[in-house]
Amino acid sequence: MTTENKPVKSVFALIHLSVGDLTESDADAIVNAANNDLILGGGVAGAIRRKGGETIQRECDEIGLIPIGGAAITGGGNLKARHVIHAASMQLGGTATAQSLRSSTAHSLRIASEKKLARIAFPAVGTGIAGFPLRECAEIMLRETAKHLSGKTSLKRVDFVLFDAGALKVFQEVFRELETEFANSTQSGKGTAGNG
């Protein structure tokens, strides 16, 4: 069952931050930091291809080119996750932008909800090979996730599986700041947490 306009504390209680190996997640879907050609090359995409097998790349090939800022879903191959959502935040060999990251995060969350998934796991999209600033990534991804979770959705949990303790610390700092910001805006009647 889904609800709308959840209290801020309950929205942020659905977001979990940890250090680990995204490809070992048993979420319903893991999110790939993808290029819009959906070619699983290096970084997170390469790890997904190695552990998940070639069937994921074959499904990506069947989908073909998607818009930058878009997302697409495939099966999970040999991964524990049943699906991979490919968040196309950059061109092949390019860099992510704030707008493409915001859009691909929102599309990934929407696809998960449309597929009635309960749990997904994100990496810090664009911060590896694409070189996007970690703190800005955390601000964009956590804000989009909180906005999504405050509305009607099937998602019961969103994990951010980060590559090291330094990345976790940045995400934790931003998480606390956003939780306070959303709580303050809700109390002042602005309703920021419920827009989206």
Image: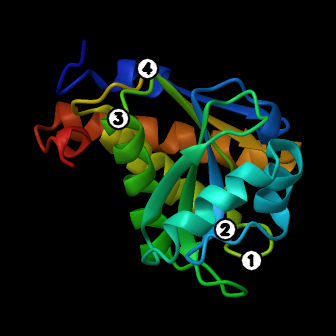
Q: Are marks 1 and 3 in contact (CB under 8 Å)?
A: no
Percent position (x, y) of residue 193? 25, 40
Kindly identify which residue carries mark 1.
Answer: 131
- Residue at image mark 2: 126
Residue 136 in sight in this render: no
Residue labelled with disc 3? 113
Q: Which mark is drawn over residue 75?
A: none
**Disc 1 to disc 4, C-alpha distance:** 30 Å
Q: Nearer the viewer, residue 171 or 33?
A: 33
Question: Left or right: 177 with respect to 41?
Answer: left
Vertically, is 144 above or below 131? above
Query: Residue 139's spot in the image, x, y percent?
Result: 52, 56
Nearer to me, 29 or 148: 29
Under tag 3, what secondary structure? helix
Question: Which residue type carries mark 4?
Answer: Lys
Q: Mark 4 against mark 3, which lies toward the viewer?
A: 3
